[in-house]
Image (cartoon, rainbow, N blue to C red):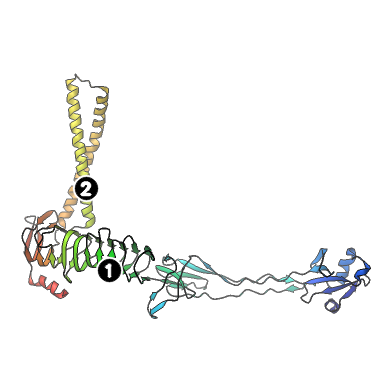
Amino acid sequence: MVSEQLFKGGAEIQEGHFLLRASRDRLQAVVVPKDAKAGIELDLNNLSHELQQFGVVSGILPEPEMLTGGGICVAKGKPPEPGENSKVKLHVKPAVVHVPKRKDPDKDEVDYRELGNIVNVTKDRLLVEKIPPTQGIPGKDIFGNELPSKPGKDRKLKFGKGVRISDDETKIYSNRDGKFVMAEGKPSVFGEHMVSGDVDLTVGNIAFGGEKLVIQGEVLPGFSIKCRGDIVIQRGVNNGNVMAGGALEVIGPVIGEETVLRSKGDLTVEFAENGPVLETAGELIVRDFIVQGRARVGKDLKALQGKGTIIGGRFIVAGSLHVKDLGSEAEIVTDVSVGIVPSMQERRQKLDVELQLWSERMNELIKNISALEKMKKDEGGKLPEDKELFLKKCQTAMPKAMDKVNDLTEQHKLLEEELEKMVDESVYVYGKLYPGVTIKIGSAMRTMTAEEEQAVAYFDKPSRQIFVRKMTREERGVVEEKQ
């Protein structure tokens, strides 16, 4: 039984020479000598028994501790350890952004000012996890009573757009491909990213895994942009590199031989000049003109708006070409191939080079073998050791070279047969078709020597040649609809 004396003046022990006191929190028992000058020492042998008489049964120290002021601590309880609050574990470190400028609260159009690089995440990626609070560890006072611990506080996970929370509300996942940001304290994934100025040293190269990337300025020389989805550039590209997994639109100039634009969707440019490379698996749409361009187009090439002019350069188009004016009065060389899938054109060029190389190698082997065998015959069937060794090497290499030439010839033949089938596309010129333009359709080629107006260049299957005819009224109506 606990005596109230322990919490007031103290209880006498060891024949009244000492007072036993307990702290109000019941976590400490202290012995104080009644007369410090008497010099009487504490009897440790009987101490434990006397403590138990006053209910002190827990935390008794094997070696009492001297305290400042002359007291002696003889027992210590164990205080309870409070539980830890719930924590948030980041599985992906997000970009931290300033408060956004909202264009429309109901739409996913937010201009976030990035403080770091774009953090790309894929759909269903685990982003954030809540670690539950703990209950804590109970304590025990010097009288053997359990002291309950205070459990940690729980809190709900907050989240923004483009994410989802698990049924047990402990995990947050990305709900789309895009950029992971911590905006206003909430994890969010946005499918659109916007750069309010130019892509320069202050921005750096951009790689974005979302649905749309908008550049409100210009892409300056030496910088590259990649986006899994669509890209819109509002002030042009100057010797930069742009790759879009979707559609790509460039408003303003596309300039320079170092410029490369690639898209898996349609590619739209306002105007391009000075040798840029334009590659698309879809349509190439020109809103004004191209001067000295290099294009590889998976579908149709259409230059029917603005000037609608293509002058100079090389254009490989899987579909048809629709243009107002093709070439110029200065007869600038303009090379156009239609009805040819760019990858097949590449394959044919590669086969041509390889076939020529192996044919030359085989002819050289034939000449060497022939010359050495004649020499051997003239020498009575014997050759010097080095020449005999060289003859054997040539004879060993000859079958391989012949097999390679035969294989490449067969591949070339099959590819030409495929290309022969792709002759239904045409070149439609709604204005003027100038001399100096070379048109290729299938295996046929024609260089224009006279100016034509409102003409269609097409492949004539019976003669296997390219002819030019006048455009029909219905065909002329196509460009009129665009104006």
Tell me where residue 319 sits by quadrant: bottom left
The residue lying at 30 percent from left, 69 percent from top is 233
Task: Determine whether the residue tagged by mark 1 lies in a helix, strand or loop.
Answer: strand
In this view, the residue farthest toward the bottom is 105
Locate residue 461, reporting x and y percent.
9, 57
Residue positioned 27% across, 25% down in the render = 386
Could you tell me residue 107's position as x and y percent?
Answer: 37, 78
Q: CA distance from mark 2 to mark 1?
A: 34 Å
Q: Quadrant of residue 68?
A: bottom right
**Which residue: 10% across, 71% down?**
476
The answer to whether residue 318 is visible is no
Q: Earlier in the sequence, mark 2 or mark 1?
A: 1
Question: Circle 1 is placed at which residue position?
Answer: 249
Relative to 83, does residue 279 appear above or below in the rendering? above
Image-quadrant location for residue 428? bottom left
Few, some or many C-alpha atoms within 10 Å of disc 1 (few <14, some 14-19, many ≥20)? Answer: many
Q: Considering depth in this image, is 255 or 162 the residue closer to the camera?
A: 255
Residue drawn at x 90%, y 73% is 34
Check residue 351 in the rendering and tell me which mark sits there, or answer none.
2
Three-letter code, disc 2: Leu
Disc 2 crowd rating (10 Å Cα; few below 14, some 14-19, many 20+) is some
Residue 123: % across, % down:
41, 67
